[in-house]
Amino acid sequence: MSEQTLPQPPAGGTPTPPAASQPPAGGTPTPPAASQPPAGGAPTATDLQAVLDRAAAGGRITPEEALDLYRWAPLHALGSAADAVRRRRYAGVEHIATYIIERNINYTNVCVTACKFCAFYVPPKSDKGWSRDLDEILRRCAETVELGGTQIMFQGGHHPDYGVEYYERAFSAIKAEFPQLVIHSLGASEVEHMSRISGVSIEEAITRIHKAGLDSFAGAGAELLPERPRKAIAPLKESGERWLEIMEAAHGLGVESTSTMLMGTGETNAERIEHLRMIRDVQDRTGGFRAFIPYTYQPQNNHLKGSTQATVFEYLRMIAIARLFLDNVAHIQGSWLTTGKEAGQLSLHYGADDLGSVMLEENVVSMAGAKHRSNLTELIHLIRAADRVPAQRSTTYEHLRVLVDPANDPVDPRVASHIASTAIEGGTAHPELKILSAN
Ligand code: SF4
């Protein structure tokens, strides 16, 4: 590895300050002075500002320029340029920040892919394996509708028996009973797996689950797309190139998606920017990625435990650089689930236009240690306190309800994020939610 995102402390445990030419830990570099010659390949402050100005004005930046900005640009200047791009893209509604109410439905924890960062899966022969039956899945959908949720994210392991037919059955049953729910679920990895199990082409798998009710791919499984970090954390997953190929096929078949990035498993800054480049190149051809959503690795209960983790500043820099570099992706989502509510709130000033979701149930990142919890009232408050008007959105980012007057804010205390996740010991299920209580 030629460039670590987090400098390693020297042996003996006494950290030394980073060399002048290196960004210090946390991704908050001191920019070179305009009058000084560049140190160790760093661009001058004047050069950095010129790139920031061009990006803020809507110009496209190269991967090399993005890497320079990511490593060296002053944090606030980076955020300010990204916010300028956001305001221009959303001129007229730039005062609004969106959120969605959704539920993750984890259908099985059995998985053959054994990603090293994953705390959720068990191998097929484990006595800790479980699968939800269709009745349980439908009851979870019913609760989602009752609480004002509009979207479900079907998320689970690569079960050795679950081919295209399994998903067809599940999605058509959900749509038959809850046609109003948008199924924004799965990703290229699941498509690769189910097509192999069923012995059909990628195109056939996508077409069949789309016809059965899948509305949109969630973009899960992107992790890190460049080969080195992907092999290091998910050696049995399809390659990053293949992940993109399948998403491109989905876009071509009329199924849009979001895109994601898992930060903080030991990848370099250059590899993070390469991940963005790979997404931007596909997006230039398809226009099918609605949003980009970076989130940070959680280090508990998995094989990478304690290896590394992205800092809040690295995360904010990524939000900003994504807004500047991904000039062809409409929405940048701030995430409070893995980085915390304050970081999520700050992301709205670093280029994000959306603050994610009230997720009525979540187990996957919670099992890896994500502890942040929230509820609808608090999420609305976070957005207002960031000087934005909250708006509940649909999967495709239409504003369903713009909360102009705080006096009319929704107040249902049951709309809380993963209040009864099976991952949380002694979970705090609301007594009225019978399914959650049963867990
Ligand atoms: S991240 Fe997904 S594919 Fe990887 S081990 Fe976990 S459940 Fe399986």
Image (cartoon, grey):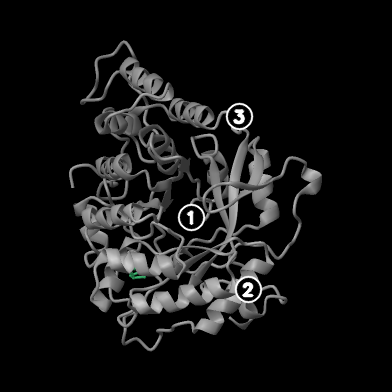
- Crowding at dot 1, Cα within 10 Å, few <14 / some 14-19 / many 20+, comes out as many
* Number of the front mark, 2 or 1: 2
Residue 59 located left or right of residue 106? left
Q: How far apart are marks 1 and 3 (CA)?
A: 31 Å
Closer to the N terminus: mark 3 or mark 2? 3
Q: Is residue 418 above or below residue 123?
A: above
Specify whether residue 424 is in view: no
Q: In this view, does 161 lie above or below 11?
A: below
Q: Mark 1 points at which residue?
A: 338
Q: Name the residue under label 2.
A: 142
Q: Is mark 3 within 8 Å of ligand 1?
A: no
Specify whether residue 371 is in view: yes
Residue 396 in the image: x percent, y percent? Answer: 52, 50
Residue 200 picture quarter: bottom left
Q: Dots 1 and 3: beta carbons under 8 Å?
A: no
Q: In this view, does 67 lie above or below 136?
A: above
Amino acid type, mark 2: Ala
Amino acid type, mark 3: Gly
Q: Name the residue under label 3.
A: 92
Closer to the N terminus: mark 2 or mark 1? 2
Q: Residue at x 63, y 73 (%)?
A: 142
Q: How far apart are marks 2 and 1 (CA)?
A: 27 Å
Quadrant location of the C terminus in the rendered image: bottom right
Closer to the N terminus: mark 1 or mark 3? 3
